[in-house]
Every structure is written in C-alpha cells, then in structure tokens.
Image (cartoon, grey):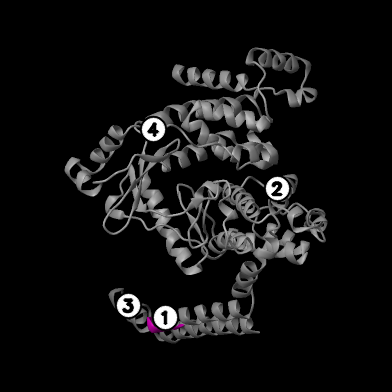
Amino acid sequence: MFSDYRRLIRAGTSLARHDVVLPGEYQSRLPLPARIAGGFLRLIGGGAKGRPGERLAYALERLGPAYIKLGQFLATRPDVFGSEVAGDLARLKDKLPPFSMKQARAALAAEFGAEEAQRLFPNLSEPVAAASLAQVHRMPLPDGERAVKILRPGIERQLMLELSAMRRAARTIEGVSTESRRLKPVAFTETIASAMLRETDLRLEAGGADEMREIYSKTGFFRVPKVDWERTGKRVMTAEWIEGTPLTTPGVLDQPGIDRKRLANDITQGFLASAINYGVFHADMHEGNAILTPEGTIALVDFGIIGRIGIIERRFLAEILWGFLKRDYMRIAQVHFEAGYVPPSQSVGDFAQALRSIGEPLFGRPAEEVSMGRVLLQLFDYTHTFGMALRPELVLLQKTMVQVEGVARTIDPSHNIWNASEPVIEAWMRRNFGPEGAARLISENVREVTNRLKRLPEVMDRFEKSLEAEPAPPPPRERFAPWWGWFGLILGLAGIVAWLVQQVS
C-alpha cells in the first residue's frame, strides 16, 4: 500500500511540474482556492510550455512505460478529455533507449534454451527500434530477413507495480467523487491493465498478426508480415522483415510514382472492410505502424492491440454510417434503440432531431473540412445526453476511426472519408439487408430444416426406445400417442415453411 502511494506522489509531482494539475488554461473556470493552488504549482514547476495535452504527453513519457500506455488509452476518450487533448496524447512518443545486446541474448536463451537460441537466432543485429515494452532487431536468414521483437527485461514486474498504484488511485477517486462514477474510473483502469498485460505476452500479438494477415490476404488492402512461429514465444515474437519506410519519415510520400489518393482510400476501406465484414480490426493504426513498401503499397505492423466487435456492433457501425451518407436520421436513431444503446424511455424522434443537427452541416462542405472523427465525437456526446452508457468496444472503434482518418489525410489532405467508405458500407448493406441477404438467410434456414429432417429417423428411434424402457402407459394414451407426435411434427414443419414464405415475400 505504501509503495502505491509513493508512486502516486511521484506521478503527481511530475504532473504538477508540467502544469497538468489545475492548468492555467482553465484558470477562469476554477474556484478561488483551486486558482491559488494552480498558481503555486506553476510557480514551483518552472513554467511548462505547450498545450495542456502536449504537457500531459511529455509528463507521461517521463514517468515510464505504464504511463505511456495510459496516455495512449486516454487518447481513446475524446468524449471525456476533448478532441485537442486526445489528439496530443495520440502522438505520444513510445520510444525509449534500447537495452543491451547481452540482455537481448539472455532473453532469447531464457525463452528457448541457450543452444536452441543460438541455432534459431544466429545473426541478431543491434536494436533498430526501441519502445516502452519491447525492442526490435533485424536478422538475416537463408529464406529471408526477420524482425525479432523482444520484451524489455523486468517489464512485467514494472507494469504490475505501476498498475497497482493506478488501481488504488481509481478506487480512491470513485470512492470520494460521485460525479466520477459516470466515467467508471475503476472499470476503465481495469480495461487499461488488462490490455497492458496482454501486450506482455507476444504469442497473443503473433496470433493477432496472423489473423489480420489472413483477412487482408482476402481483401487485398494491406500487407501483413508472416509470423515465424518456430521463433516466437511468450517474450519473443519473430516475423518476416517488411522492407519499406514508415509514414512518419519526412518526405516518404513525395517519391515519384506514389498514388496518394489510392493509398488514402486503401487505408479507409481496408479498416472498414476488416471491421464490418470480419468484426476484427488493427486498433493502433497510427503512421508509425504503417509502412510504405517499395511497391507503393501499405504494410501494417505491431498488432499488440486488436479490436473486436460483434454482429450487433458491426450492424450498428454500418447502419449509422450508411444513415449519415443517405441523410436518414430516423433510421440512425432507430438503430441506436434497436441495439439497446439508448434507453427505451427516450424519444426516437428527439434523438433523430439531434442527429440531424450533426449530419446536415456536413453536406456541401469541402472534403478536407468533413471529419468523420468529429461526427462520431458529436454522436457520443448526444448519446450520453440521451442516457447511453459507455460502450468500451465502441470507444476503441471510434478512436481507431479517428486514427484512420488522420493517416488517410496525412497521405492525401483532400481525402473524403465518406466517399471512400461508401462502397464498403453499401456492399455490406446489400449482402445483409438486400435481396442477396434475404436469399442467404432463407438458404441457411432451409439447410437447417433439411439437416433436422435427416436426423428425424434417428431422433424417432431414440424416442421409441425410451418409450419401451418406460412402464407401459394406460390404454387410452397408448392408442393416441403415436399419431399425436406426428401431428405436432407436421404443425412445426408447417410453421417453418410459413416463415420462409414470409421471408421470401
């Protein structure tokens, strides 16, 4: 317990030094005691520079890996902290000095055994990139180069200690502030902790990379490195080396022959195709994880955070985007109520009116001024107004869509995310709600009925054997039981046929 408070005092001191606690920008909104306290903190802090979000990002970088990850998760909550602060936090520099080759070799030996590690990793290079949780090495092999990712020594224990302090802070805040309970600080902290600890098992990241590679091999929008499973373990992940240049590199998109419009469309459509069609998406799609290959295509790396949405959320996403594209605000409102996101006590008409105030200002404006991220942020504001509870899976989806839009606009400043989205959404709507979707639904149900009929003799045989094992029923029931059972079966089949006819019509 005392170590938790010691770490929280250290964190609070760093935040105060960077003018994050009671910042000057909000001075006019604070009561007099808070203004005095804020002025004192700024006096001893030495006058930190930059916007509040920039100062917070800088402070978190100085506090270490757990706080860097905390900042990245806070960036997913523009509905709480505002879009400017969230944008500044999204640019957190997840870069630290590398650890030594001796420690890297020791980690490989601990994971695979000394002799096996020497065989599997014969020509490991010096670190080529180092982040808060792991660093990457390059390794040539006869069948191609590999990227070898190794966790930092002792990172699991360091995370556990810092997360313990964060949990204590969250419990304290929720206990003393009733207003904070709406934001669910304890649940939010547990979400962060769970995600951080998952990132320390590189087998999970390898599984996510392999799954995304399988999806994008079908959609064709992105290239994903192939996992080298023989050289992958809990603390080590190996994949093929992707030759190319990260989009964070200055001037990378100024090379001759680069089709910026196509690349920007690929970013938007590739994300939506995986999220809507498969219910899974790369949830950390910033420029550093997108690599421009020599062939002029985009490769994605770093699959530590994978987002997942169920069929209800997929339908929700597709229908609200389609509704905004078609200006069908009543349908968008109905989808929220059908999904159970807005309480039935609220008015569908009033909610549709609020949605109209979001959508109508978009039409007729230049593409670079129409932000899907802003639309989703306003949508979250209104859903809170109408009693919608926090949905973690939708928050992660919204955060990723903001990232996707940012990357696409970096590639092509005139990128129209709505026009790029329309073909993917329209195809999904046609498959699931048009004639094609109805035909597939009927086909699936006919197949289910056929399979049940094929099993009918077996079911009836078991039924008759169970009757033989039971004591003989009274004569009247013995006389009527057989035809009554068949009569019930015929009624059931007639009901199924009637339902199928209704679907066709």
Residue drawn where x is 65% and y is 55% of the image: 340
The residue range painted magenta reads 450-455
Q: Please, what is the three-letter code of the amino acid marked with disc 2?
A: Leu
Viewer-proximal residue among 452 and 123: 123
Q: Secondary structure at mark 3?
A: helix
- Mark 4 or mark 2, which is nearer the start of the sequence? 4
State the residue position of label 2: 377
Q: Is residue 490 left or right of residue 241?
A: right
First in sequence, mark 3 or 1: give its number. 1
Outermost left residue = 115
Q: Crowdedness of circle 3 by 10 Å Cα count: few (<14), some, many (20+)?
A: few
Q: Looking at numbered disc 3 in the image, what kind of residue is underneath it?
A: Arg
Select label 4 or label 3 by which is in front. Answer: 4
Residue at mark 1 to residue at mark 2: CA–CA distance: 47 Å
User: Is residue 483 in the magenta section?
Assistant: no
Mark 1 / mark 2, whichever is N-terminal: 2
